Each structure stands twice: as C-alpha cells, then as structure tokens.
Image (spheres, rainbow, N blue to C red):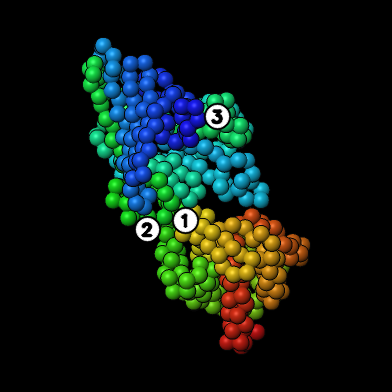
Amino acid sequence: RVTGGHVHCRALAIKVGQEDLRNSPAEIAVSGQGSATIMQKSGPIEVTRSLQLREPYSGEFSIMVKNNGSSPWSGPVGVDVGLVSEPKGAGSLFGGHGLEYREAVYFADEKITRVKLPFDEKTTPSVLEEKSSFKPEWVASNSLYFALALMPKGGELFDVKVLRTGFNSGLSAQALDRTLYELWLTTIVNDLAPGASKTINFDLYAGPKSKSALSATFISKNLSKNIDFGFFSVVAWPLFYVLKWFETISKNWGLAIILLTLGLKIVLYPLTEKAFVAGKKMQKLQPELNALKEKFKDDKQAQQREMMSLMAQRGVNPMSGCLPILPQLPIFFGLNAVLMHTFELRHAPFAFWLKDLTARDPLYITPVIMAGLMYIQQKLTPAPTSVDPAQQKMMQFLPLIFAVFMLTYPSGLVVYIITNTVLSLIQQKYMMRKHASLK
C-alpha cells in the first residue's frame, strides 16, 4: 500500500546497510502486465525492487543496488519475506492454531528447517533462529494454507534470521493488535564501485500450500517439501493420496472421508475379528482366572505364571484385544493432520450445515451425534468382568468427554469418527452372529 510517497507494506521490505527502508519515500511504477518496481534511496545508495508475476502463483523478484556515491560501498542487503500473526482468537474455539498458524522455513543441502512461531503477549524483540553464510535453495514464510517463498538464483551466500519484533508503532492501528515477526534473507555486497550496480535475483512463489501447485512450480523441485503433516507424515501422506482419489470419484470431500473410512474398516477387519474372538474367549476364561487370582493372592509371581499358562493352554492372547486400536491411533492423528494442513480441503463443503470440513461444526451437531453413537457402542460392548466397577462407571462418561474434546476439531474428523463408529456397530452385530457359539 502506498500513502504519501511512503511504503508501508512489510512483505518483501528491504534493509540496506543498517537502514530499514520500510517507511522511506519511494517511487513506484506499476504496469498492467503483472510487473512493478519500487525505487528507494539510502544515502548515496539507490535500491530498486522489481517484481514480475507469472501464472498461476510464481514470479521473479530482484533487488538492484546502485552506488551513486564517490567511493566504493560495501554492506548487507536484506529482504523480509514477511511474517505477521493473525488477530488473537482467530483460531479455534479455545484459541487453537487455526488461522494463527505461522512458521518460517528454509531448505538447504537437502535439509529442511522449520521455526514454529509462538503466539503470546511478549513484545520484547528476540532472535528465534539464525544461520549464516550458506546457500538456501528456498526460504518461505507460511500460514496454515499459504506460503510466500523466495529462491535465490545467483549463487550468493545468505544469512537467515527469524526475529520476533513485538509491536511496531510505525504500523497501522490494526496491526498494533498483532505480534510481529520478520524473516530476513540477507547477503553482503562487497566493493561496489561508484556508478556500478549489483542485482540480486530470486524466483518467487506466493500461493497455496497445495501439492499440485507446488509440484507444478518448476522453480524448485523441493518446494513441495514445504507442506508439513508433522510427526504423522508417514501416515498422513498415504491418507491424503487415497482421500484425493476418493474425492475424484465422489466429487465431494465428505463422501471421500466416508469412503476412506469404509476402506480402512475393510482392511482392518481381520484384526477386528481376531480381537473380538479373543475377547469372547477371555470372557469364558474369566471365572477360572479369578479362581487363580484367589488361590495365589499371596504370591503375585505364581499368580501371573499360572494365569499365563492357562491362557496359553486355551489359545488366548491377552494382547489380541489391542490389535484394532494400534493402527487406528496413527490413522486418527494422520487424518487430523491432513484436515488441518491440506489446502485442497480448505472451505470444502460436505452437506447441510457443514460448509467447511477443515473447520469445527458451527452448530456442534456432529459431536453430539458422535457421543450418542459412542454411548450405544459402549452399551453393546460388555465390559470385562476384571474391570473395577468404579472404573466402569468412569468409562460411561468417555463419550461425553470425547464430544467436548472434539468441539474444536475439524468437522471432517468428526465425520470420520461417526462413520467409523457406525461401521463398527455393524461389524459387531455381524461378528456376534458369526461367532454365537463363543457365548
């Protein structure tokens, strides 16, 4: 934005030497061909920023430094890739990271470094990350779904510095309610002769953190690594590709989640059935196990040994009941990562009041439905006789606790849980009929 000949825009702001040109007078030229130039001066040094946009999200950015003085000039030239948090409370119901999500990222020597930016009330300036004299392949500032990335083209050595600057009185009143961050990409210009100029060239990406968009950008083959599903990436990426495939078939991301859940239940059914059979066998064995507990109540080692021996004789594995749960936990967190970080799902509607599967249910209807279904499932699943009655009573409140917990999570994740619970109830009814002889 230009006001009174001064540039107030923080993105791609410039420092020359020790002078920040953010609020300095500027001459600006904009063409109708997607290009713009901004010329500013710092003493005898003239700095011209040029931006040429290409379709759909890429472009070229350059900084030309010209020495209009009478003696050679040396000094740092830096560009701020631009980071600013969203207003407080812009995320989920309890703060969350929603739109407040911000991070600084750089990629060099086949290694990616991420700096998650904290959201707090601190205004004291501080350095969050610093790396000197290296050649980054790209440097980016990320929001939850979008990225601004610069890719140096000239082979210069750069310094990267991530700063928390706190409140800045030079910015607008609206910005004063925000915690500010800066991501500086700086190189050194040495011995620039009088009348000479030096141009620092970058490729630029400004667009969604979409796998297809980033992969279609031929600027850097590694730019798609900017998408981060976190700790569960190894699970999240396969889920994303399968989910995307189902979406191409159904033309609806909500239906794709339902189809994905159905596919997972089919794949995991052998484990589910094995756990069901083991649970039934354990129930039949429970009176004998209780008798052993009473018989060896004063000798815990003998009690454990005899119980394990009895279960081995009857072909019961006490760990079999955990088999269906083990793969479901990483799937749950992996799908949550996909829903929280996938641009393709942003504002994707399902049906009725669910207009955005990445946002919480605005009417909180699906968490209530989920709690009701979980309660029904709990009633149809007899608790093991070995479980303490007080513990059983506490478990009755789990559906309610889980529903409150899910109020702030993406509605798409709640759709997954509802579908999974319904399919589990159907599977349970089927297995009870199939294995009726185990009663």
The residue type indicated by label 1 comes to Phe
> SS class of the residue under badge 1?
helix
Label 3: which secondary element = loop
Quadrant of res 14: top left
In the displayed structure, does residue 13 sit left or right of residue 315?
A: left
Near mark 1 (Cα within 10 A), the count class, few <14, some 14-19 or many ≥20, is: some
Residue 351 in picture, x, y percent from top left = 59, 70
Most distant residue in the top direction: 70
Task: List x then y, in percent, for residue 149.
Answer: 38, 42
Mark 3 or 2, which is nearer the eye? 3
Measuring 59% from the left and 84% from the top, which residue is drawn there?
A: 430
Q: Is residue 207 left or right of residue 192?
A: right
Quarter where residue 167 is shown: top right
- For disc 2, the marked residue is 212
Q: Are marks 3 and 2 in contact (CB under 8 Å)?
A: no
Q: Provide residue 330's location: percent of width, then percent of height.
A: 50, 60
Nearest the viewer among 173 and 402 is 173
First in sequence: mark 1 or mark 3?
3
Asked whether residue 79 is in view, the answer is: no
The amino acid marked with disc number 3 is Leu
- Structural distance between the alpha carbons of marks 3 and 2: 36 Å
Q: Label 1, on which residue? A: 343
Foreground pick, 383 / 45:
45
| Mark number displayed over residue 171 | 3
Q: Amino acid at mark 2?
A: Ser
**Observer-nearest of 248 and 243:** 248
